[in-house]
Amino acid sequence: MTISTRPTYCPQCGEPLALRTVGSRERLTCAACGYVHYRNPVPGVGILIELEDGIVLIKRGGHVKPGLWALPSGYIEADESVEEAAVREAREETGLEVQLEDLVGIYSFPEGPPTSGIIVFYRARPVGGALHAGDDAQDVRVFAPDDVPELPFRTHRQAIQRWLALRQRARYTSEERAGGFHIREAEPGDADAVLDLLRLVDANASLTPGDWDATRQRFGERQTISVFVAQANGAPGQVIGFVAMSLVQTLTGGRGWIDDMAVALDFRGEGVGAALLEAALRHANRLALTHLYVNIARGSPATRAFYQAAGFQESAITYLRIR
């Protein structure tokens, strides 16, 4: 696909275009009707199709990086949503009907090719069709995670790296479930257990009975707060840890905020805290949040060391950049 970025004549009145400064940049403009030619990034979509415990790649045809392996991808049509474009591109290039699972990432490529753009990557699984090279693909194949070749596009490499990290986290969660505990979303019946764990936090020692009643009410009415609990395997109802993440929407994107997290004394040092934090990170990724903030000023030195070891910055209000 080739997009002209320097038209010669005005598309509205046909008069010649000339450069002049508009909005602190030189832009092609029409002196006759006032038209301004803005060069905006083109939106595209890419799909990470999981199949046979691997990832589907196509060997590119066309004139942009022909003969090299890449993720199925393409531009979004004017009359379709991003999700519709992802499903269509998967069908056209791989022959597979897919269901989108979650968002992997959104990346810019001002360097092209062939022009500046923004690409949205989704993870997907096949629900029909048959794997075969279509559209302008020369070949299609499933690659094991360890055998993925070097991809020609930076954004595709970033998406693959993100996918591999998400797989590793999912495998870690599976190992948790096979071990002594598993992570799940909190239910209304977990209120007493969560409040008992909150009492283990030194900073909560000064809370009044009224404060605790308000805390219980917020747990029951939570709308912008996501709570995950760690439950011991083989012990129904035994909650051994929890993490609460508030969702904050700003003008520049979504943020996550963790102020409350605790693990039962008998289960500390067994990976419960790390698993809860991973659950919060996965949830933040599904919501396309950009940062996850943690108030570690309320925690013990061991708590602060735990967050810093997990990759958060060293400060009272620490954060981890997600995307």
Image (tube, rainbow, N blue to C red):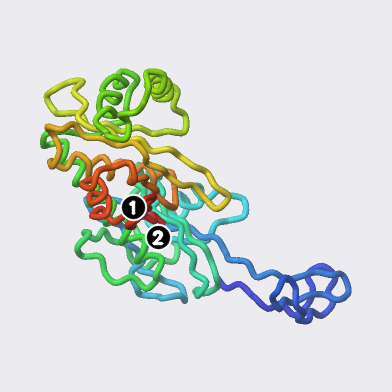
**Residue 103 rendering spot, x and y as whole percentages:** 41, 49
Circle 1 SS class: strand
Residue 36 figure quarter: bottom right
Q: Is residue 60 left or right of residue 18?
A: left
Circle 2 SS class: loop
**Residue 136 rendering spot, x and y as whole percentages:** 44, 66
The residue at 45%/75% (across/down) is: 64
**Few, some or many residues within 10 Å of mark 2 (<14, 14–19, 20+):** many
- The residue indicated by pointer 1 is 49
Identity of the amino acid at label 1?
Answer: Ile
Q: Are marks 1 and 2 in contact (CB under 8 Å)?
A: yes
Q: Is residue 71 left or right of residue 143?
A: right
Q: Quick check: can you spot residue 52?
A: no
**Residue 252 rendering spot, x and y as whole percentages:** 55, 53
The number of numbered discs placed on residues in the rendered structure image is 2
The residue at 58%/56% (across/down) is: 77
Identity of the amino acid at label 2?
Answer: Pro
Q: Quick check: can you spot residue 24?
A: yes
106 to 2, vertically: above or below = above
The residue at 35%/35% (across/down) is: 244
158 to 25, vertically: above or below = above
- The residue indicated by pointer 2 is 72
The residue at 25%/43% (across/down) is: 300
Query: Which sits in the foreground, 111 or 50?
Result: 111
Split into 4 quadrants, where in the image is the C terminus?
A: bottom left
Split into 4 quadrants, where in the image is the N terminus?
A: bottom right
